[in-house]
């Protein structure tokens, strides 16, 4: 659907919703809608990213098809979010050689070959006996890892920061309004706990129209698991740079425990969400959004499984190969992150912050 037609359809549906207001207690989207009478494209974009896709409004709505109004807010919001992920990222597409599944696979293989060659050139121990079994630096020097991963990571951070700036300038305006420190704690808590992913309080009407907290819990498992993996990497860097303790680390050390728990949580959460999506109502989204969901969940699963295998096999002959697979997956993930659904967390946090800002201004005498 052309973007002008999409936003016109979103405005039509939300105008009906604004007149009805039956769903006012389900999530912050509907109270925020009541503040707007003449909806703009920026308003629709903000409301779509504030939506946590719980589906409760669709289950409760009396104006869904076959009614002539044919309302479906979850679907139209999903389409608007899909536009958001493209519109605010510059450049709008990943490098051509990384585009699509074939591009990502090509990038993965290219990085894996590069890392293998660098391993042979620098340590000469790839697939051979290690003097210190379990140490990744016996296979690839630390500097090589930093240089290979640092470029894509830095690129993604710059692109994502610029996308956040462009999004905020479009849906809100002044960047100085991001400096209201009193609103950030509650925003981050709401985002971290997925407070708005429970509809009227009983859980998402997902996957098939019955309230359940399962989707929220699985999403939290993925989010917290990812956070634990970041903590694992950070703690390992701290131990190496500050405490001068080099890997491999003991099984009960902070890097190993947080990485293991985080990896298992990611795999369990991703597989659970994939199973739910197989049973979900097709009316609640589009083929494009479902593909984006599947790609992200499978990619996160690959990252987590390969990371766990580096621990399980770190003293065996396959450690070199598994380490290269994991590092190649990490590098490609960094490179394509701005062009995947990974970005949805950034826009969602900004939408929650804007909603808290509007709520505070509305209630302040």
Image (cartoon, rainbow, N blue to C red):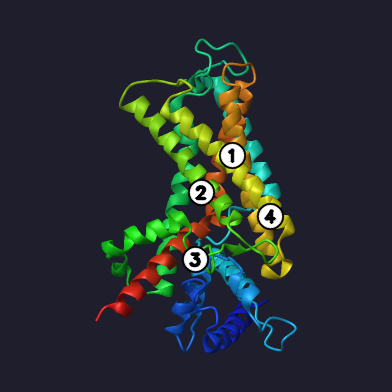
Reading the chain from its start, which is encountered first: label 1 or label 3? 3
Across and down, in percent, residue 274 comes to 68, 51
Instruction: Point out which mark residue 259 bears.
Output: none
Distance from the alpha carbon under mark 4 to that under mark 3: 30 Å
Distance CA(mark 2)–CA(mark 3): 23 Å
Q: Residue at x 50, y 33 (%)?
A: 259
SS class, disc 1? helix
Q: Nearer the viewer, mark 2 or mark 4?
A: 4
The one nearer the camera, 256 or 346, is 256
Q: Residues within 10 Å of mark 3 (few under 14, many from 20)?
A: many
Q: Note whether 20 is above or below 137 in the view shown.
A: below
In this view, the mark in front (4 or 3): 4
Query: Disc 4 versus disc 1: distance between alpha carbons?
Result: 21 Å
> Who comes first in sequence, dot 4 or dot 3?
3
Q: Is any atom of residue 247 visible in this view?
A: yes
> In the picture, residue 83 is in which quadrant?
bottom right
Which residue is identified by label 4?
276
């Amino acid at each position: 659907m052309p973007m002008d037609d999409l936003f016109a359809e979103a405005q039509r549906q939300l105008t009906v919703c604004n007149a009805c207001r039956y769903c006012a207690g389900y999530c912050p989207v509907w109270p925020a809608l009541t503040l707007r009478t003449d909806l703009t494209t920026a308003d629709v974009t903000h409301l779509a990213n504030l939506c946590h896709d719980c589906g409760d409004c669709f289950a409760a709505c009396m104006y869904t098809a076959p009614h002539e109004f044919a309302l479906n807010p979850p679907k139209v919001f999903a389409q608007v979010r899909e536009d958001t992920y493209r519109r605010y990222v510059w450049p709008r597409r990943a490098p051509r050689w990384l585009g699509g599944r074939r591009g990502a696979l090509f990038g993965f293989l290219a990085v894996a070959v590069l890392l293998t060659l660098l391993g042979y050139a620098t340590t000469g121990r790839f697939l051979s006996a290690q003097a210190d079994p379990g140490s990744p630096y016996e296979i690839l020097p630390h500097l090589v890892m930093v240089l290979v991963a640092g470029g894509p990571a830095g690129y993604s951070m710059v692109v994502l920061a610029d996308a956040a700036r462009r999004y905020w300038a479009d849906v809100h305006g002044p960047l100085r309004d991001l400096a209201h420190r009193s609103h950030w704690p509650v925003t981050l808590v709401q985002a971290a706990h997925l407070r708005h992913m429970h509809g009227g309080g009983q859980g998402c009407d997902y996957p098939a129209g019955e309230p359940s907290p399962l989707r929220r819990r699985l999403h939290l498992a993925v989010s917290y698991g990812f956070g634990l993996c970041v903590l694992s990497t950070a703690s390992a860097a701290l131990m190496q740079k500050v405490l001068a303790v080099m890997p491999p680390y003991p099984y009960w050390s902070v890097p190993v425990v947080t990485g293991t728990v985080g990896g298992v949580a990611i795999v369990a959460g991703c597989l659970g969400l994939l199973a739910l999506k197989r049973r979900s109502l097709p009316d609640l989204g589009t083929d494009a959004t479902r593909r984006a969901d599947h790609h992200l969940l499978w990619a996160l699963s690959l990252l987590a499984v390969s990371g766990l295998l580096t621990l399980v096999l770190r003293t065996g002959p396959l450690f070199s190969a598994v380490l290269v697979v994991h590092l190649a997956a990490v590098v490609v993930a960094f490179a394509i992150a701005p062009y995947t659904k990974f970005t949805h967390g950034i826009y969602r946090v900004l939408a929650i912050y804007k909603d808290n800002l509007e709520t505070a201004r509305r209630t302040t005498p």
